[in-house]
Amino acid sequence: MSALLDNWPGTTAPDAEEAALLAALNATWPAARLWSCAGYRLRDGAGGGKRVSAATAGPEATPEGIAAAEAEMTAAGQRPLFMIRKGDAALDAALEARGYGIVDPTYIYSAPIGRVASAPRPDTDARTITIWEPLALMEEIWAEGGIGPDRLAVMHRVEGTKTGLLGRLGNDPGAVGFVGIHDGIAMLHALEVLPTRRRGGMGRAATIDGAAWAAKQGATAFALLCTRGNAPANALYTRLGMDVVGQYHYRQAPAGEG
């Protein structure tokens, strides 16, 4: 069985806190369709990526129900994919036995919103505009980072308070992001900095400014997700005073299935 679930850096969040963060994730990056099968919550992401396409285990889910969930995902034209969270060790082992591979181990970061909003700014003139709906320029920057129309559609599906972020270094735009708020938790998604604009502080500024905007909307916590392999981003969020409070990974069916 994978040791990922036992490798928790930093502070381990209470179950209630982790559940609140995952609820905020689902609300601020929603699937196009949700349905249940054999105790599993299934998602159709409509091309919006793994977060909105992965099945999750409910309280009544068992390893024996995997086959039914697989059949549902296959019928929906999806390659079977499951999100493995804390407490899903039995599911993780069962999927490993079925040949599923690990994909995108991911950290969940969180911090009191004032800590991020008041973090030291970069030693540049990087600044961020908050705007919704996205400008065409923002969509172009997202597209360069692989965030196309299907993921933009996820942002448009978000109900409630949200904004886009447009980062500039002087007069040069080069960073974008998205923030949604759910039950007092502001979640940062889709932060992208153009390769030619990196190392100018725009990612740091966009994160800080996104938190400052959310604080004005009444949010009390700021959270985001980062894959374990993204060393520069993990270093940035640590420097901003954010804590790793949870983690998850995916298990995906072998190629050719689903």
Image (cartoon, rainbow, N blue to C red):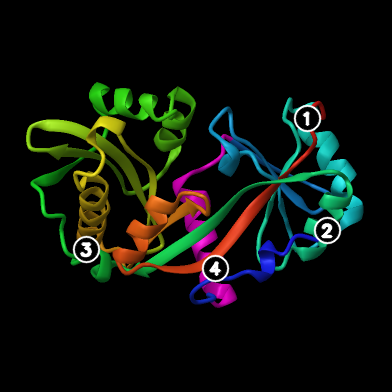
x, y percent for residue 207: 27, 53
Query: Image quarter for residue 238?
Result: bottom left
Whether residue 249 sits left or right of residue 233 in the image: it is: right
* Quadrant in the picture for residue 219: bottom left
Q: Nearer the viewer, mark 3 or mark 1?
A: 1
Query: How would you rate the neighbour count of disc 2 (Cα within 10 Å): few for under 14, some for 14-19, many for 20 or more?
Result: some
What amino acid is labelled 3 in the image? Ala
Residue topped by disc 2: 93
Amino acid beneath label 2: Ala
Specify which label sits upstream in the sequence, 4 or 3: 4
Q: Is residue 102 above or below residue 236?
A: above
Q: Report the residue marked by disc 1.
A: 255
Circle 4/circle 3 CB separation < 8 Å: no
Task: Please tell me which residue lies in front, 56 or 232.
Answer: 232
For disc 3, the neighbor class at 10 Å (few under 14, some 14 to 19, many from 20) is many
Q: Are marks 3 and 1 in contact (CB under 8 Å)?
A: no
Specify whether residue 61 is in view. Answer: no
Q: Which mark is residue 117?
A: 3
Q: Nearer the viewer, mark 1 or mark 4?
A: 1
- Residue 25: say if magenta: yes
Which residue is rendered at x = 31% and y = 32% of the image? 195
Tell me the distance, in whole angstroms, between the alpha carbons under discs 1 and 2: 19 Å
- Disc 2 and disc 3: Cα gap in Å? 40 Å
Res 53 visible: yes
Q: Which residue is mark 4?
A: 18
